[in-house]
Image (cartoon, rainbow, N blue to C red):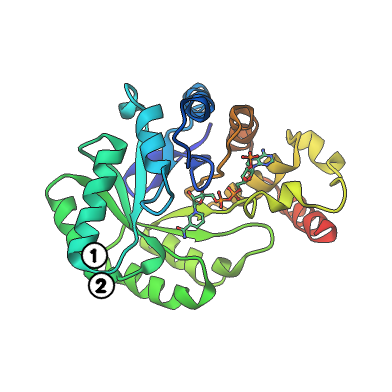
Amino acid sequence: MEYRKLGNLDVSVIGLGTLRSFDVTEPADLEPRRQIIDNCLAHGINFIDSAAMYGASEKAVGITTEGRRDRFYLATKVRIEGKEAGKRQIAESFANFNTDYIDLLQIHNMIDWQTHLPTLERLKAEGKVGMIGVTAMVNDAYPGVMDVMRSGRIDTVQVPYNVVQREVEAELLPLAHELGIGVMVMEPLKKGRYVKELKGEPDLTPLKGFGVKTWAQALLSWVVSDPRVSITIPATSRPERITENALSGALETMPQELRDFVREETVRLL
Ligand SMILES: NC(=O)c1ccc[n+]([C@@H]2O[C@H](COP(=O)([O-])OP(=O)(O)OC[C@H]3O[C@@H](n4cnc5c(N)ncnc54)[C@H](OP(=O)(O)O)[C@@H]3O)[C@@H](O)[C@H]2O)c1
């Protein structure tokens, strides 16, 4: 597994997202998630991203990382209007994770960010939060995100970046690189669509020599082969996929001609 700087942390380039996949409460559903966490440890994945708005996900992360909290960096997000409501939601995140320290607290989709930023800055100054970040999903939000990046008040940004959605290449990634702001990539597989919903089998032949054995690995390797990316966080509900996805974090940088091939092959099959 390759490790890169995300702000001041050394994170595995492949992390773990938990949207939908960790929104579970039943013991029978928690067991495979515990195996996902086991497999993360076995393959060097050391970063988990969640959010207050992901149903039971934060709590499931807290339960399945119990006794091994110190082996992971935990990230979550505040998403609510208002100062006091934000503080309450953040307090719940600490309780759900069952921790007194959160490595990264992000403002989800920049919602009410002017209100939450001072709260997060205070928590960081008190040593309860390690880093501050923002997330954004739509192009219209990027100018605002870049203004906050330039203000020097945040350590990380989380944005979509994959073979099809490449808008961040123009300005946001160069700016993050210039300012030394960590970049976390959401939706590397476009919620799984670029693997599960293709209209045919992608041709893996040109990628064999590179070490890629599955299309998910090709897509993940495509993302992390951009050196401006610190980490990507594919989500899964299936423990065996951790082994598959983690391998993409151990490959060399994908040459540009192979990156072009992976993009063209995905577009051809969409
Ligand atoms: N606004 C925001 O801040 C925001 C928005 C979206 C996402 N995020 C974060 O980014 C993370 C990743 O995004 P995402 O979960 O929406 O999408 P994603 O990671 O692109 O895709 C997840 C889907 O891909 C499937 N998958 C994973 N590995 C696979 C493999 N090797 N082969 C085939 N299918 C595979 C999973 O299905 P199985 O369960 O069947 O494996 C899951 O349904 C989220 O979990 C969340 O933490 C943040």
Q: What's the amino acid at mark 1? A: Leu
Mark 2 secondary-structure assignment: helix
Mark 1 surroundings within 10 Å by alpha-carbon count, few (fewer than 14), some (14 through 19), many (20 or more): many
| Amino acid on which the number 2 mark rests in the picture | Gln
Quadrant (top left, top right, bottom left, bottom right) of the C terminus: bottom right
Query: Which residue does the image show at 76% across and 33% down from the upper left?
Result: 213
Task: Tell me: 206 left or right of 211.
Answer: right
Tag shown at residue 117:
1
Where is residue 132? Give x, y as percent: 29, 55
Residue 254 drawn at (x, y percent): 68, 46
Q: Which picture quadrant has residue 111?
A: bottom left
- Kindly identify the residue that appears in the image at 56 percent across and 72 percent down: 170
Going 79% across and 34% down the picture, which residue do you hit? Answer: 209
- For label 1, the SS is helix
- In this view of the protein, can residue 120 be seen by the observer? no
> Which residue lies under the disc numbered 2?
114
- Confirm if mark 2 falls within 8 A of ligand 1: no
User: Residue 28 at what x, y percent from top left?
Assistant: 52, 25
In this rendering, position of residue 10 left or right of residue 83 = right
Find residue 78 and report its image quarter. Answer: bottom left
